[in-house]
Image (spheres, grey):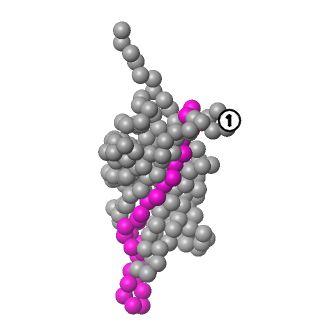
Amino acid sequence: METTQLTKTWAIDAAHSEIHFKVKHMMVSIVTGSFDEFEGSVKTENNDFEDAKITFTAKIDSINTKNVDRDNHLKSDDFFNAEEFPELKFTSKSFRKVEEDEYILTGNLTIRNITKEVELGVLYHGQAVDPYGNTKAGFEIKGKISRKDFGLSWNAITEAGSIVVADPIKLDLNIQLILN
């Protein structure tokens, strides 16, 4: 008798998830920002999520660095061009277990209509049922991308000769999924 695996579909629980990034500013400090509006889904046939299919989008207009002028500059054509490219998108190519709770997530990230393959480290925190009977799963995702690879190339030089915005962007996502 054949057994068939059922696909489980999970959604990002935005109320319990955070999408953060960090970039070196003026080569002396770090600016942290986030995207406040995002959604995503995960489809898996495995309880440990290996080989899961993941999609994610974030609204560029929701960028938040706690500075209105900087946020408006990031939304402008100097950076994301939120008017023409309102979302960034990610689609997984593989989700591979490398240790008990550690995975490598590889996928295509699209920003400003430029798509590049990225690799991210993932720590799986497990599953639990909340007080309302919902099954949840938690993940911590970290990685680094080059902003210039995605056409985010604006920069300026300080009086001392330093660049204002570094190229590498560190990604730090804390994701809670809810089983649909």
Image spot of residue 170 (x, y percent): 42, 63
> Which residue is at the front of the view, 53 or 50?
50
Q: Quadrant of the C terminus?
A: top right
Image spot of residue 143 (x, y percent): 38, 58
* Above or below for 89 versus 165: above
* Above or below for 112 versus 15: below
State whether residue 128 appears in this view: yes
Q: Is residue 85 toward the left or the right of residue 151 in the image?
A: right
Give the main secondary structure, helix, strand or loop, of the magenta stretch.
Answer: loop
The answer to which quarter of the image holds residue 99 is top left
Q: Is residue 95 toward the left or the right of residue 72 in the image?
A: left
Q: Residue furthest bottom?
A: 160
Q: Residue furthest top?
A: 1
> Which residue is at the front of the view, 68 or 106?
106
Amino acid type at image mark 1: Tyr
Q: Secondary structure at mark 1?
A: loop
> Which residue is at the front of the view, 73 or 19?
19
Q: Residue furthest right?
A: 132
Residue drawn where x is 60% and y is 72% of the image = 67
* Above or below for 175 versus 42: below
State whether residue 44 appears in this view: no
Dot 1: within a 10 Å radius of its alpha carbon, few (fewer than 14), some, or many (20 or more) residues? few
Image spot of residue 75 (x, y percent): 53, 64
Part of the protein shown in magenta: 151-180
Q: Quadrant of the N terminus?
A: top left
> Which residue is at the front of the view, 31 or 132?
132
Residue drawn where x is 41% and y is 31% of the image = 46
Q: Is residue 35 toward the left or the right of residue 104 in the image?
A: right
The residue singled out by tag 1 in the image is: 132
Residue drawn where x is 36% and y is 36% of the image = 51
* Above or below for 105 versus 51: below
Residue drawn where x is 51% and y is 60% of the image = 20
